[in-house]
Image: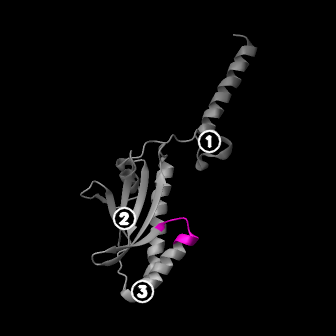
Amino acid sequence: MSPVWRRARTVAARGVRDARARLLGAGRRGAAYGPDPDLVPPAEPLPLSRDRVAEDLARRGYRFRLDGEGDVTGTWDGNRFWFLLLGAHGEILQVRGRWSGTIAPQARLSVLQAVNDWNRDRVWPKVYVREEPDGLALYAEVSVDFEHGATDEQLAATLSCGLVTATQFFSTVGALTPGD
């Protein structure tokens, strides 16, 4: 092999090695920062499933169970949450929370006003009051259509959004209802 070809092969091998190192997070950005986002292909969306929801919650160390209807459910800050797959093909993920508090008759108007203000001023969660046998119940929902699937990051973000924003609203209403 001629010196010119040997040099070309060495340069090519170095280029491949450097490109591989950049993909794996080494090189100019440093391994501590992870792969260069310009060189890493985006994650492919995967079909939504109860298993994926449960895996994400378990990965975070959250406690949950399947209820009698097979829905993932759990309690966060004392409030019951459900993680429902809705739609004809289970493509809509809904995080639904029910406030554990009670709405006293004298607080009804202030709670209804808080619900209206929240829905007017914020995108998430949708909140509403529903008449139930033991009085008024307060719910919060975040729903996202994942007809074409969701990446793990999208799924995690939706679950977090539902839990965090509903819990924020329940705290807001708790301040309006003395005794809870």
Residue 10 seen by the camera:
yes
Q: Quadrant of the C terminus?
A: bottom left
Task: Using the rendered image of the protein, determine whether residue 178 is visible from the camera's viewpoint.
Answer: no
Circle 3: element type? helix
Q: Are marks 2 and 1 in contact (CB under 8 Å)?
A: no
Q: Is residue 30 left or right of residue 134?
A: right
* Of residues 180 and 119, the one drawn nearer to the viewer in this rendering: 119
Sequence order check, earlier mark of 2 and 1: 1
Which circle, 2 or 1, is nearer the viewer? 2
Q: Quadrant of residue 72?
A: bottom left
Residue pointed to by mark 3: 107
Locate residue 83, reporting x and y percent.
Answer: 37, 58
Residue 4 in which image quadrant: top right
Q: Which residue has dot 1 on it?
A: 26
- Quadrant of res 19: top right
Residue at 63% in and 38% down: 39
**Residue, disc 2:** 81
Quadrant including the N terminus: top right
17 lies above or below 102: above
Q: Residue at x 48, y 54 (%)?
A: 144
Q: Are marks 1 and 3 in contact (CB under 8 Å)?
A: no
Identity of the residue drawn at 64% across and 28% down: 16
* Location of residue 172 with respect to 74 vertically, above or below: below
Tell me the kind of residue under disc 2.
Phe
Point out the tag, 1 or 3, that comes first from the N-terminus: 1
Q: Which residues are magenta?
A: 119-126
User: What kind of element bears circle 1?
Assistant: loop
Q: Nearer the viewer, mark 3 or mark 2?
A: 3
Label 2: state its secondary structure. strand
Q: Earlier in the sequence, mark 3 or mark 2?
A: 2
